[in-house]
Image (cartoon, rainbow, N blue to C red):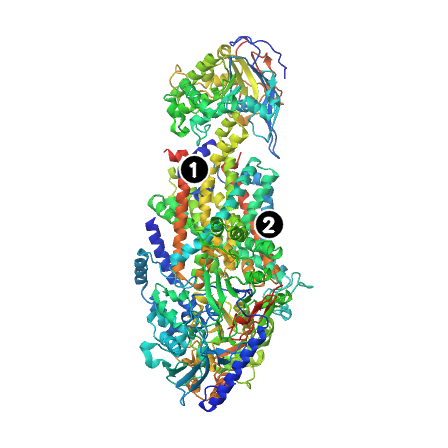
Amino acid sequence: MDKIDQTDEPTRRTSYGQRRKDRIDALAAASIDEEPGISLIRSAWKRLRRNPIFLVGLAITVAFVVLAAIAPWIAPWDVTASPLLDKVRPQTNPVPGPEPGHLLGGDDRGRDLFSRLLVGSRQTLVVGVFATLFGLLGGLTLGTIAGALGGWVDSLVMRIVDVLLSVPSLLLAFTVASLAREPSQWTLIIAIAIVQVPIFARLLRGAMLAQRSSDHVLAARSLGVRPWAIVFRHMLPNAMGPVIVQATLSLAVAIIDAAALSFLGLGNPDQRQPEWGQMLGLAQRYISEAPHLAFYPAGCIIVVALGFTLMGESLREALDPKSRR
Amino acid sequence: MSLRRNPATLTAAVLAAATLASCADSQRDDGDGDGGGGSDDGTFIFGAAGAPEMFDPFYATDGETFRVTRQMFEGLVGIKPGTAEVVPELATEWTPNDDGTEWTFTLRDDVTFHDGEAFNAEAVCYNFDRMFDQNEAGQTAGEYWGYVMGAFSNDAENSLYQGCEAAGEFEAVISISGPTSGFPTMLSLESLSMQSPKALEEGDANGIAAEGEGFSFPAYADAPVGTGPFTFGEYDEANGTITLARNDDYWGDAAQTSELVFRVIPDESTRRQELEAGSINGYDLPNPVDWAGLESDGNSVEVRDPFNILYLGLNPEANPALKDLNVRKALYHALNRDQLVSTQLPEGAAVATQFMPDTVSGYNTTIEPYAYDPDEAKRLLAEAGAEDLELTFAYPTEVSRPYMPDPEKIYEALRTDLEAVGITVNVKTASWNGGYLDNVTAGKYDAYILGWTGDYDSPFNFIGTFFGNLKENDFGTEAYPWGKTLADDLRAADAVVDDAERGAAFETLNQQIMDEYLPGLPISHSPPALVVGPGVDGVVPSPLTAEEFDTVTVGGE
Amino acid sequence: MTQQTHRPSQFGGGSAEPLLSVRDLRVTFQRHGEEAFHAVDGVSFDVRPGQTVGLVGESGCGKSVTSLAIMGLLPDRGNHVEGTAVFDGEDLLTLSRSAMRDRRGSDIAMIFQDPLSSLNPVVTIGRQVTEVMERHQGLSRKEATPKAADLLERVGIPDPKARLANYPHQLSGGMRQRALIAMALACNPRLLIADEPTTALDVTIQAQILALLKELVVDTGTALVMITHDLGVVAGLCDEVNVLYGGKVVERGGRHGLFKNPRHPYTVGLLNSIPRLDAVRGEKLSPVPGSVADNLPWTSACAFAPRCSNAIAPCTQETPQWDGDEVVGFRCFNPMGGPR
Amino acid sequence: MCVVVVVLSMLVFGWLRSLPGGPVSAMLGERQTPERRAALEAALGLDQPLPVQYAKFMERAVHGNFGVSTKVLPGEDALDVFLSRLPATIELSFLAMLLAIALGIPLGYIAARRQGSYVDTGAVIFSLVGVAVPVFFTAFLLKYSFAVEWNLLPVSGRQSTGVDATRVTGMFVLDGILTREWDASWDALKHLILPSVALATIPFAVIFRITRASVLDVLDEDYVRTAEAKGLTSRVIRGRHVLRNAMLPVTTTIGLQVGGLLAGAVLTESVFSFRGVGDALATAFREKDYPVLQVLILAAAVIYVLVNLLVDIAYAVIDPRIRTR
């Protein structure tokens, strides 16, 4: 432990302007453990099992994923149908209230709100997962190239990554989303993914660099294993711990960012398939007369984002060598 | 009631005008009761959705600017409050010569500008010459002049306006190139208001310049001087408030409140909350969803008569299948517009039977709406061999217009109907300022929703705008065999001098457009509303959304 | 376990009453939901004025925890301390927090292992010295400053006045340790606990610091508890040596006796791991095999048994008892060498 | 830094021009025809090739002229628009940051001192909830409850209409104090409370967590044990030894949060119709006011760099390891 503290020391002193990078790097450093791989996860799990924060996060996340998976089959109504349309009157009754068969009432198009919330979990999950996945893939590519090749490639890639990191993330997503000629769910996903790329790139590159000089990589190299085989078989798998942590946190960020972009009108224009962020955005019109229309999706977003955040933060703490005492 | 353009009915016109003027006067009198004088009669605070561009109405283009300048400026002709009718304002009467090219305006003799300058025929001609004589930047910035007059002094032959002459101290003669239904109604446009020649001169009012992407305005644009019931106070940019003060020397009845404040609150729900908190006294275009709630909280929602049209535009150049009239009719029959109007649009909205609201002259009352008949739609599609019709159908985001409070929802309803008859809809969208309009004009969409709010009472201002320009219109009428005929007929009808004849010509055209051409599908007319808080009286809602606030009183508790 | 009775020491330091008398000290770490761990498991020893006592053992044997427990510096939660540590008639373990604060730094001072990390990087050396005097002697900063310079001079720091304004990172490792010693000595403590004071230093510096400590102890008559894993350090300094293993004292003796005639196999192992200049070339150092992770529980065996070359059957079945008194003794079923 | 700004200006310029629509669409609305659009574009020089436009822009910019705003404050130079909006945002961000620091640091310290206690767990969860709730939703909830439902604070804006106030700096609270118009100052402060609380949630969560982690790190440091061994009073230990060291990373974090504050200000200011830079940015985006957008984005970058520079200087002041290197 002392050893790790000491290697950390110079980082903390020199790059004093970049705490955010430090955090990512510290996470990356977590991948160099004396006994990489399974035992790390096992010891982390041992700690996590007793962490109430993690358990709450896990419960929320599992419930969310399960709901998203089975939503279309348990939703009482077709989310594109408008069974309550006859009751919609723009002034007197813009949003039909609850009634038997419609637990939470309908939305402004007379569609069953409860069903839309249920099924909305699906699209929300899709946006979160794909945004994180794309971000991860981009970051993986950049980080692997930089970390594996080193030298000027590393400098160049990292310079770009640092510039991207310095732009406030939401502003960047906002910019990318408004750049799209024809907004769709995918432009939303890509906008959010781009924000994630530099974070993953830096994380992976840090983990790679840390491992380039580690014993098992040196051993593999001395045995004449081909460089790319080393990268994919030895370095990448060992960098997965911090990546999983960051991905969990990114899922929360992606869901919140999607909500913010939808709020600004940059979300998915096709409002048939419900998505929470978009439902929240559309509910702004009824905020005075039917605030519940905004509260339900907002509540869902908050709970799910909280679930991912709680889980991610406790995972990070469990993997952080400093907190293991 | 369209009387004033036929020389034969000259006398009648004058009489009618006088009557109307007195009507307006008596209305003002009614509201007067306890007001008047230079005392402090309270402040009317109006929540504006956006900041004004500047304060010279000539260069202004948006409603938020006009709403402010309207309180300070007047034109030669005005609009009767609560209607779209033209009434005398700074001119008491006007008479054209026989061919309708020279118009003599008799001016009020008791008007002075806010800076003390006298209002007379010279001032009128100074104003017209000033508007006519624009530099390059001014020609693009002076959009409304370009729109109604066609050209500026550097291209004088193509301009409707030909000159102005002071025939007497209070008699101005304006020459135009030829008769049109728009003149002199167009003089009621806020942009063509009368401004103080001295202030224009001193403020270098025409010294507009293009700089980068925008126009830099001369000093005058921040210190406007008109003749209206309010004078310019100050623009507190940091706090987003514009303060106007009562003009105590106003020629008519003095404004009822001593101060008029516009406060910029871009967010709709915030405007409502501010109204309920009592920090503003009213705002424009309340969300129809909120109307009932606002009323029950003691506010009054003033619903205007609709003066707009929402339509589903079709572009045969983008999708050749639409060239078949039966296909277009099928689309029309597929739309359940009654349900749309009742479930998506505010009370007072109506299903449209043609491309203009019934308050416009030339409206054809005999046209029957296309029935909602999905079976007929399917039959027509089958007949045209277009059962598998695929339609790229678009709507705009980030916008709310009087004719479409919520484009997304209207679109969703239309899309559902179209899909119900077997049409495949490709959803397209773009933000209003972010390419939607470009894509519409560039013909990128097969179908789209769009609309129009009338500038003044003129049929040509509606259907002329839509189909009058053959080369450049959003409906791609050039692709139809009848496109040119329609454009020519519209221009011919517009040039008819006699009001009744012209009205009849436009009625016929409306019938033809709906029966034989159907270049697009008129959907509905929506009434935009205005809301004022408890204790506020005297607001006269205008179909042109051109309310004047001088009659407004802010009652106490 | 045998209860030890008091008897005057026969090694150095005269025959005065013990300044510090630790009896049956136990420190148990227990994290929520985890098994309890006895870091210190019934340690007893005495320190008389002027005497230097060594606590020796590998890392994890409980020597540092013993010193922290005496100083009251163990973390607030997650541990449990039993036994007594009587200092000057008062049991330090039952003193109130504030009373303990009053003692620390004035009566009892401590020197730590890593001089760099033990110094606050953002506070000047001078301030770190004077703050002790301000706290315990009621001096103002102004009054304390010249005294601090004197102190630095005493511990052998050249140009002491200039050094006062320096930050730790501007000093060399040896200077830092000297500064740390100066801080510890600032209020003339009666007992000084030095926890591996030379481990983090170069060999040449180590000797200087040890010499300095020895000199200071002799000069001031301060009692010293020397905690180290290095019997070599002990050899030159300590009057009495306690060898700790697995939280228990496994052997105790005077410096000379212990080195000459070690009884516990662990002590023997430690002695063998000291590099000797006179060793035959090529002869390997023989460290104790295995690690503390292999320990057996003291309750039913000798904790050292798995690593012991001398282990016999009872070693894995019973707890070895203390064989000896509070001055000399060991804890082993099968001791090495003959009786002293 | 100049190079960065020039490169960024080029990127921003090119990017804005590549967006569909634009100022002309915003000006013409339904009246737009290709003909009229072309005329307006010609008048504004938008029909020229991009490099030419950029060259002209740079030429003007060198003379301190950044082009006039088309919509936010038409006719004014974009830089003036930014400068006139800046005081409001400074006022808002300053108060938000003050709240975040005043709450985040003590709470972070207490949580660290009582690591694992209910206070700690509660504070950690609270901060994570702060992360999970989208800032615009926080803003909305605050407005809805405190301003609309309970009528305790103003709904929106910076100062009530009719308050007699003299403008000096543009920071209304300060102006009121300078001119001794206490009413105006108090009124402006009341308008500031809700937006700044909403905005503070972003930096609060981060400052709290960094403080907690940093204090935990420092508490583990040997020099704290040394200080304890010296018998120093807990006040001295807390102030001189724990907090002074723990503040180093917190200082950097505060600097980095400025970027996040700018993004948050866009959302917060729009919810509260607070006329600051964020509101100008939102309006400029909606109405495609390119000159203003350019200046705002460049200014944000410059401010970000400057603040980080200040942080580095501050860091050097409190960390002698850097100062005396």
Residue D204 rendering spot, x and y as whole percentages:
52, 45
Say whether mark 1 and mark 2 are on the same chain. Answer: yes
- In the displayed structure, would residue D66 be above or below residue B125? above
Amino acid of disc 2: Ile
Within 10 Å of disc 1 (Cα), the crowding (few <14, some 14-19, many 20+) is: some
User: Mark 2: which secondary structure?
Assistant: helix
Image coords of residue A292 (percent x, y) = 62, 59
The answer to whether residue A131 is left or right of residue B375 is left
Residue B327 in view (yes/no) = no
User: Could you say whether the residue bearing mark 1 is in a helix, strand or loop?
Assistant: helix
Task: Say if B162 sits above or below C223 in the image.
Answer: below
Quadrant of the rendered structure where residue B142 is? Answer: bottom left
Q: Circle 1 sits on which residue?
A: A12
- Residue closest to the eye, B466 or B117: B117
Q: Position of residue B58 (x, y in %)?
A: 41, 72
> What subunit carries mark 2?
A
* Distance CA(mark 2)–CA(mark 1): 35 Å
Image mark for residue B103: none
Q: Residues within 10 Å of mark 2 (few under 14, many from 20)?
A: many
Residue type marked 1: Arg
N-term-proximal mark, 2 vs 1: 1
